[in-house]
Amino acid sequence: MLKKTFAVVATLGLSVSIFGGSAYAQNSTESKIESAQEQKAQEEYEAKEEVQLAAEVKDDSVENIEEQSEELTEEVADLSDEEYTRFIHNYVSENNESTEEMQEKLDLVGVEFVPEEDKGVQTMAIKDPSKISLSVYSTKRTGQNYWYLQTSWRSKEIEFDPATLDVVSLEWDPKYGKFYTAIAGGKGISTKRDGSKRDKGIYLFNVNDSKYNFDSYASVQVTKKKKGWLEYGAKYTHTYSTTKKTKTGQAGINFDATGPSGGYSYSVTKTTNVSSWPKYNENAVKLN
């Protein structure tokens, strides 16, 4: 969110009221309050059981996790769908471990993990897609009959010229995967937007890029229609204002049949003084 600092200019016959205080002081106070609110929100977030569990699995060695495998598997199995997707998001995000080590650790806690490396695309407002990382991956808990198709993103910069809400989709081949349910991240960072084409293999979420950077993920659960490779992907469309006048609300959407294996995808409708760029990542999981 753009924070504006106004200079107070004193001229003959014009002075700052001692009762109202300066706009600069007011802005400084607001900034401190917002900073304190963000810190509190971060502390509350990090205190969540599933966030701490993700940190434990990420930071511990494979050997130690193996020793606690039964207990940790039970903890993961007891998580609700919302808690589980948050656990996976926190484990995957900014994880410097090798793909093999991540898979080995998650396997020890009862999770089958199909990762996909980030694919940077080279294109402020955030006008450069390389400033937002986008990953897409799938997981399945032991004993469940559906897969979590999930995407996580992280912005490396603050958006100073926000426009309409950003949009992220999860797209999959509807011949192999049947929609079960969808989950958005917390704190209003991502919210469910449109599931009307879920039978065509797409679900849309709004993204508020002026919100906190944690819980920046979205997930859909799908069940198997038939055996084979389920192709899926995520498309993130970032919008920004080309003027200093901020636009709000939802971006207009058009659907088309350009998603995985003939499933649906989307594009953002062009609007005056608003520009946008898309970023896409894809993956596949074998359904047995």
Image (cartoon, rainbow, N blue to C red):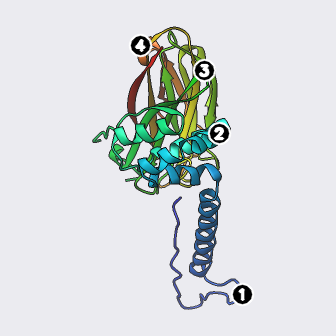
**Cα gap from disc 1 to disc 2, whole angstroms:** 49 Å
- The residue tagged 1 is 19
Q: Nearer the viewer, mark 4 or mark 2?
A: 2
Task: Report x, y in % for residue 276.
Answer: 42, 39
Q: Is residue 209 left or right of residue 275?
A: right
- The residue tagged 3 is 145
The amino acid pointed to by label 1 is: Phe
In the image, residue 133 above or below residue 252: below
User: Which label's residue is closer to the chain start, 4 or 2?
Assistant: 2
Q: What is the residue that sits farthest to the right in this orientation?
A: 19
Element type at mark 4: helix
The residue at the point 68 percent across, 90 percent down is 18
The residue at the point 55 percent across, 37 percent down is 218
Q: Nearer the viewer, mark 1 or mark 2?
A: 2
Mark 1 neighbour density, 10 Å: few (under 14) some (14–19) many (20 or more): few
User: Which label's residue is closer to the chain start, 1 or 4?
Assistant: 1
Mark 1 and mark 2 in contact? Answer it, CB < 8 Å: no
Q: What is the residue that sits farthest to the left in this orientation?
A: 122
- The residue tagged 2 is 82
Residue 139 visible to an observer of this rendering: yes
User: Which label's residue is closer to the chain start, 3 or 2?
Assistant: 2
The amino acid pointed to by label 4 is: Ser
- The residue tagged 4 is 261
Residue 272 visible to an observer of this rendering: no
